[in-house]
Amino acid sequence: MNALERLHLLQAGDLPVHGGRTLAYVYDGGDAEVDRVGRAAVAAYAGSNALDPTAFPSLLTMENELIGFAARLLDAPDTVVGTVTSGGTESILLAVQGARDSRPDLDRPTMVMPSTAHAAFHKAAHYFGVRAVVVPVGPDFRADPEAMAAATDDSTVLVVASAPSYAHGVIDPVREIAAAASAAGVRCHVDACIGGWVLPYAARLGRPVQEWTFAVEGVTSISVDTHKYAYAPKGTSLLLHRDTALRRPQFFASAAWPGYTMLNQTTQSTRSGGPIAGTWAVVTTIGDEGYLRLAREVFEAVDRIVAVLAAEPCLRLVAEPDSTLVAFATDDSCDPFTVTDELVSRGWYVQPQLAFEGQPASVHLSVSAATLAHLDDFTVALRESVVAAREAGPVVVDDDVVAFIASLDPATLSDADFDGLLAACGLVGASADGSMELPSRMASVNAMLDLASTAMREALLLAFLDRLSRPSAAPAP
C-alpha cells in the first residue's frame, strides 16, 4: 500500500466534509466545481511562502483583494486595512495582542467581554497577559451593554462583542457596546468569525439583522473567517482594522540577530500560500451573487430546522437564531447527549454543549448551504433520535463516579487519576503503547463531564487530549 492509498484508507474514518450532514467543524457550499477549484489552487501554492510579500507578490495581490472584498461586505471606510490569518483564533489573538501593545503604559491591561464570547479570547488572555473581565449576559444570551460599560476602566484595552456568539447564535448589541467603548477611548472588536461572511447577505435578503459592521461608530476591528461561510478551504480568516494606526501594533519586526530582519504581520512567520490561494480562488469563483444565493439556501435550511424543532414537544430552541447557528435543548424525557449520539449514528454529526452557568446542556448545529437538500432526511433522523432517547431514558452517572470526580483536584490531576476515572466509568483505558481508543458513543462521557466543574472539565479533556496524542510507528513502505 502506497502513501496515498493509506491516506485514503485513514480518511475513511473521518467525518465527511461534504454532503451537508456534518453540522460542526466544516462548512459545505454544496458545489463540487468550486471545491475542485479551491483544492487545485491550494495544491498550486502549497510550496509558496507568504512570509515575504516581495518574494511572492501574487500572494500579496490575493490577500489585498480578499480584504477588499470583505471591506465591501463590512461597510468599511476607505481607511480600512486587513490581514489574512490562519483562522478565527489567530485573528482574535492578534486583535487582543494589538490592543495590548497599543497601550505600553499599562502593566496590567484588561479586556471586557461577555460570558458568551468565544473561548479564543480566554486563550488570548492566557497568552498575552491581558486579564479577561467577564460580564454576565442577559436572559436572551446577548451582552449587557450597561454592565460592560460599568466594567470598563482605565486598565481596559479592548471591549468585545460577537456577531453572532457561537454557543447561541445571537448578535450582541454592538451599537451600544461600541459607543460606550468609544466614549471611554477603548478599542471595540467584533468577533464575526462565524457570521461575518453571511450576515451581510442576510440583510440583503431582508432578514432582520441589527447593525454590527464598521457602519457602527466605535467598532475598531472585525474578524471574519473565510473557511466558514465563504466556503473556502480550511486555514484562513480575515482581521480588518478601521485604519493603519489601529493595525500597526499587531506587526512585529526584529533585527536583533545576524540573520534576515524578521518582519511579520501575523503570529506566524512562514505561511503556506496554499490556503490563501485556495480562499482567493473560491471567493473569486463564487462571487457576490453566488454568495447571495448560498445565503438564501442556508437561511431556508435554518428556518426549516427551526420549524422541525418546534414540532417536537420535548425540544426547544435555546434562542431564536440571528444567523446560521441553531442551539436546542431537551426536556427531562429526552437526554440531549443521547439525542446527539442517535443523530450521529444516523449520519448527522451535531455538537453537544455542556451545561453552563445555570443553563442546561444543549445541542448545537452549524448549518451549511449544502444542508438544505437533505432536510427531509434530517427531519426523519431527528424524530427517530428523539424516540430512541426517550426509550433509553436519562443517562445516569454512577454515584461512585460522581464522588470520584469530586475527590479530584483539577490542578494536580495525574495519569493515575485519569486512568482511575476511566476504570470507574467502564471506559477503555490506555493500551499497551500508551494510546487510547475512542468510545463509539459519547453520551455517558458527556453526562460525566456535565457534572464536573469548569476547571475539572478542562483538566479531564486536557488529559484526554494528551492520551490521544502519543507517538506511533508508521508502517514500512
Image (cartoon, rainbow, N blue to C red):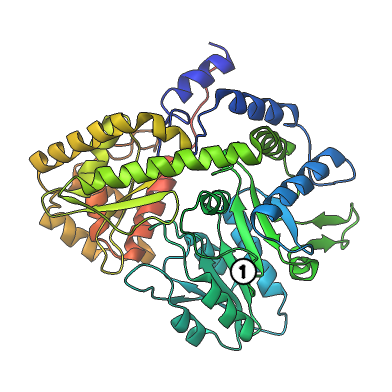
What's the residue at 34%, 64% (across, down)? 454
238 to the left or right of 269: left
Expressed as whole percent of the image width and height from the top left, the position of residue 7 reads: 53, 21
Q: Is residue 432 above or below residue 448?
A: above
Kindly identify the amino acid type of the residue bearing the numbered disc 1.
Answer: Phe
Can residue 422 be seen by looking at this rendering? no
Expressed as whole percent of the image width and height from the top left, the position of residue 39 reads: 64, 27
Q: Is residue 347 above or below residue 302?
A: above
Task: From the image, tell me which residue sits under label 1.
Answer: 128
**173 vs 340, nearest the viewer:** 173
421 to the left or right of 240: left
What's the residue at 72%, 66% (across, down)? 242
Query: Which element is circle 1 on?
Result: helix
Q: Is residue 415 above or below residue 300?
A: below
43 to the left or right of 163: right
User: Within the image, what quadrant is residue 450 found in?
Assistant: bottom left
What's the residue at 72%, 85% (across, down)? 105
User: Within the image, what quadrant is residue 14 found in?
Assistant: top left
130 to the left or right of 399: right
Expressed as whole percent of the image width and height from the top left, the position of residue 407 reads: 22, 65
User: Within the image, what quadrant is residue 239 found in?
Assistant: bottom right
**170 vs 462, nearest the viewer:** 170
